[in-house]
């Protein structure tokens, strides 16, 4: 196929191209059979390049499998560092790893998987690049499946073994205006938008023509959702306001305000109560307001409507109220799903359970936020996704040697960490310990000790040597010279 020379041998037309309707063209990624090949290599398709998908891509034996990754993002997001990049404590590059690092050992397509046919073992995918056809292209609509279908060329991919690691989306509870006016923090692109908006708020507030009331409104930063992501973002933003904002916008610092809203009666519900109290005390001392039992009813441009408080003007609203199912998973039929979260149910070896037979599918696995167990579900965290990816590496690499690996997946909880600002953090391992040992040495830590644990944990977990050098370098540079406050 002349148009895709680099894919020769991997791509094979499943149906001939219809010249009059190029949009409807379909390609089938099918391995070229070699008559001399002693043993057919199986095609493993990994959907997603997050903690689950990228983790598996790193370790899977690419000599024994044809590995194909299909993901709309060309990189892996190191999510625990996103809040730091959103305020400039770290640069964006430090929180991502490129998928193409593993090419040509693996094949990568920047595409969405829109449908899985489990009986035919095929996937319908849509390029996540801008439309190749000359039809109207609107990059702002690229997340809308109807738009993608109308403006791009779908292709079909075949798999022998499939790993679904498509993660989840941000939950909005269908509250009107959230999607349009709030910022989410799931991807480095979101972090970039947030950073740009924060700096824009300051530049707008700095205009000579506006009143102090307008300044106060613009510099009112609201965070909805008191989970670890919301808390860490509020903490990082607080650090920015207390340091570089005071240097670069000395007249505006007094107008700034951060409020964290949550509908529940407490923040950080997964942490031990003593650590929650500690965080609340620290936030209150540092001037970060926590308003629990507050219900957001709707959002308009620059305005939040709260049942208990009325209208609240804001310059930036960051929304982090948990997870909503990935549309691929919501639309997926034939597999058993958790009725509440819509995540795919797997057995203890991570195979998806087929609805009709109630039996595990031997060639399809689901990991990460898109998957759950029927009984005793695990939290939707990077820790779980990454451990499941490691389990899959062992499983698939063992299967490739014609041996079976039947050990069930076992989660080893390493505890939870959250940064809470001003070089303080909280660390909780107590929930992993049996009753009576919950107050054991180092089971809960706060302050600088926990902060050191937080930084060392994420430095250790950083995947590439490049980022192992860049992360501490930026920590040091920004501590020494301050954050980069340039708005692009
Ligand atoms: P993701 O990492 O979200 O990856 C999903 C992948 O699938 C992405 O590459 C996406 O582009 C791709 N995809 C989506 N749809 C499709 C499709 N239709 N077809 C193909 N590919 C698709 N957890 C912790 O344990 N510790 C932390 O400190 C921590 N901090 C966090 C901070 C933030 C800001 C956020 C947002 C999350 C944090 N988490 C943390 C949670 C953790 O990031 C998630 O649990 C983890 O990312 C889940 O991994 P995953 O592979 O399932 O999904």
Image (cartoon, rainbow, N blue to C red):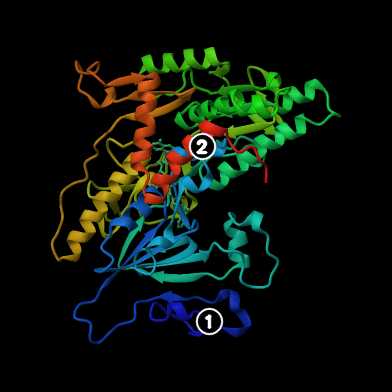
Against 383, residue 309 (above or below) is above
- Report whether the residue tagged 1 is closer than 8 Å to ligand 1: no
Residue 398, numbered label = none
- Report whether the residue tagged 2 is closer than 8 Å to ligand 1: no
Ligand 1, by image quadrant, is top left
Residue at 25 percent across and 87 percent down: it is: 35
Rendering coords of residue 402 (x, y %): 14, 66
> What crowding class fits label 2: few (fewer than 14 Cα within 10 Å), some (14-19), or many (20 or more)?
some
Rendering coords of residue 256 (x, y %): 67, 22
Rendering coords of residue 2 (x, y %): 51, 85
Q: Nearer the viewer, mark 2 or mark 1?
A: 2
Q: Which residue is mark 2?
A: 477
365 left or right, relative to 176: left
Against 65, residue 277 (above or below) is above
Residue lying farthest to the left in this orientation: 403
Rendering coords of residue 170 (x, y %): 51, 41
Residue at 50 percent across and 48 percent down: it is: 93
Which is more toward the observer, 422 or 284? 422
Residue at 43 percent across and 65 percent down: it is: 108
Which is more toward the observer, 267 or 155? 267
Residue at 25 percent across and 48 percent down: it is: 347
Against 25, residue 231 (above or below) is above
299 left or right, relative to 473: right
Against 204, residue 49 (above or below) is below
Q: Which residue is mark 1?
A: 3
Q: CA distance from mark 2 to mark 1?
A: 46 Å
Residue lying farthest to the front in this orientation: 480
> What crowding class fits label 1: few (fewer than 14 Cα within 10 Å), some (14-19), or many (20 or more)?
few
Q: Secondary structure at mark 1?
A: loop
Q: Secondary structure at mark 2?
A: helix
| Residue 372 seen in this snapshot | no
| Rendering quarter of residue 261 | top right
């Amino acid at each position: 196929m002349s148009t895709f020379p680099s894919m020769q041998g991997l791509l094979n037309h499943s149906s001939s191209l219809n010249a009059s309707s190029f949009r409807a063209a379909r390609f089938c990624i099918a391995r070229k059979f070699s008559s001399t090949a002693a043993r057919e290599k199986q095609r493993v398709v990994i959907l997603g390049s997050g903690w689950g998908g990228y983790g598996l891509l790193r370790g899977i034996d690419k000599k024994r499998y044809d590995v194909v990754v299909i993901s709309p993002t060309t990189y892996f997001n190191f999510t625990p560092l996103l809040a730091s990049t959103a305020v400039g404590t770290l640069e964006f590059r430090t929180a991502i790893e490129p998928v193409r690092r593993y090419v040509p050992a693996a094949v990568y397509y920047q595409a969405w998987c829109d449908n899985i046919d489990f009986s035919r073992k095929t996937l319908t995918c849509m390029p996540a690049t801008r439309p190749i056809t000359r039809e109207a292209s609107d990059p702002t609509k690229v997340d809308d499946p109807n738009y993608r279908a109308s403006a791009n060329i779908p292709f079909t991919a075949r798999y022998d073994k499939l790993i679904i690691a498509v993660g989840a989306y941000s939950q909005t509870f269908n509250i009107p205006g959230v999607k349009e006016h709030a910022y989410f923090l799931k991807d480095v692109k979101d972090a970039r938008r947030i950073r740009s908006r924060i700096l824009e708020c300051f530049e707008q507030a700095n205009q000579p023509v506006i009143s102090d009331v307008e300044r106060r409104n613009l510099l009112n930063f609201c965070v909805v959702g008191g989970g670890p992501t919301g808390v860490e973002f509020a903490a990082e933003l607080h650090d920015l306001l207390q340091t570089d904002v005071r240097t670069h916008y000395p007249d505006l610092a007094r107008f700034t305000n951060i409020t964290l809203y949550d509908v529940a009666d407490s923040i950080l519900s997964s942490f031990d109560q003593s650590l929650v109290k500690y965080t609340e005390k620290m936030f209150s001392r540092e001037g970060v307001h926590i308003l629990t039992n507050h219900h957001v009813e709707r959002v308009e441009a620059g305005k939040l409507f709260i049942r208990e408080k009325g209208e609240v003007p804001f310059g930036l609203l960051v929304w982090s109220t948990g997870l909503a199912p990935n549309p691929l998973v919501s639309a997926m039929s034939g597999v058993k799903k958790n009725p509440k979260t819509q995540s795919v149910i797997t057995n203890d070896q991570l195979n998806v359970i087929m609805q009709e037979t109630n039996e595990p599918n031997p060639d399809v696995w689901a990991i990460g936020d898109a998957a759950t167990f029927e009984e005793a579900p695990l939290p939707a965290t990077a820790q779980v996704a990454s451990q499941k990816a490691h389990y899959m590496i062992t499983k698939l690499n063992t299967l490739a040697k014609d041996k079976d690996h039947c050990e069930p997946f076992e989660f080893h909880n390493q505890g939870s960490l959250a940064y809470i600002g001003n070089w303080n953090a909280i660390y909780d391992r107590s929930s992993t310990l049996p009753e009576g040992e919950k107050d054991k040495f180092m089971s809960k830590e706060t302050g600088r000790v926990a902060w050191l644990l937080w930084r060392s944990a994420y430095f250790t977990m950083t995947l590439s040597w490049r980022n192992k050098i860049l992360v501490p370098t930026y920590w040091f540079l920004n501590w020494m010279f301050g954050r980069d406050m340039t708005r692009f």
